[in-house]
Amino acid sequence: MTGMTQTRLAPAERRYAAARAPRRPTGYRYPALLLAALSLSGLVTPLARAEPAIPMEDLAALDARVADVTGVPMGQPGGAAGKLDVRMRLARCPERAVIDAPQMDAVAIRCPSVGWRIRVPLVAASRRLPDAAAAPLVRRGDVVELIYEGEGFAATAPGTAMDDGAAGATIRVKTLTAAAPVTAMVSSTGEVRISR
């Protein structure tokens, strides 16, 4: 090379120059051939053979069932706080979804066979304040008899009151079997009820 001087780059400068050099695009030369191979292997399904949509649970029907279980319309004290979020995509339950009794100002809806479970918050029931003349029938820390009543059955269990309450007041009760306290109404001295 006449007239031109060639300079040698130090190793660090060579790495810098290589990093700054324009890169050639990488990819497959034959994308159509690649897609055909992947579709034959089953990894990619063409749009024409798309799988049928999975049937989804009817959220409006679940809202109506929650209102039936609570016995109170949506938005009222003791009823659901609002409609279920329509963005939820719950797979349809093959059997009727189970709605648990209200506990801690919420109702649980679940489908054991599919495996989904959602929690529906309830509007807090107004806790009746006892009259100044009415003495509480249940005091915090008292051992109470928890009576759970349903259609054609009644069950009892011991519990511990977590609040004071006069007749008709709603209090929290801690039971031996439930991890979270349950909400029950004071019916008489040392007795609280959950009605379904």
Image (cartoon, rainbow, N blue to C red):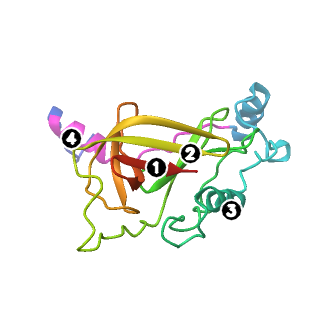
Q: At label 1, which amino acid type do we have?
A: Arg
Q: At label 3, which amino acid type do we have?
A: Ala
Label 4 residue SS: loop
- Answer with mark 3 or mark 1, whichever residue precedes in sequence: 3
Q: Is residue 37 left or right of residue 81?
A: right
**Mark 4–mark 2 distance (CA, rounded to whole Å):** 97 Å
- Residue identified by numbered label 1: 193
- Answer with mark 4 or mark 1, whichever residue precedes in sequence: 4
- Answer with mark 2 or mark 1, whichever residue precedes in sequence: 2
Magenta region, residue range: 12-29
Q: Is residue 28 left or right of residue 39?
A: left
Residue at the spot x=19%, y=44% of the render?
A: 5
Label 3 residue SS: helix
Q: At label 2, which amino acid type do we have?
A: Glu
Q: Percent x, y for residue 192? A: 41, 49
Q: Residues within 10 Å of mark 1 (few under 14, many from 20)?
A: many
- Answer with mark 3 or mark 2, whichever residue precedes in sequence: 3
- Residue identified by numbered label 2: 149
Q: Percent x, y for residue 105? A: 43, 57
Residue at the spot x=65%, y=37% of the render?
A: 29
- Residue identified by numbered label 3: 64
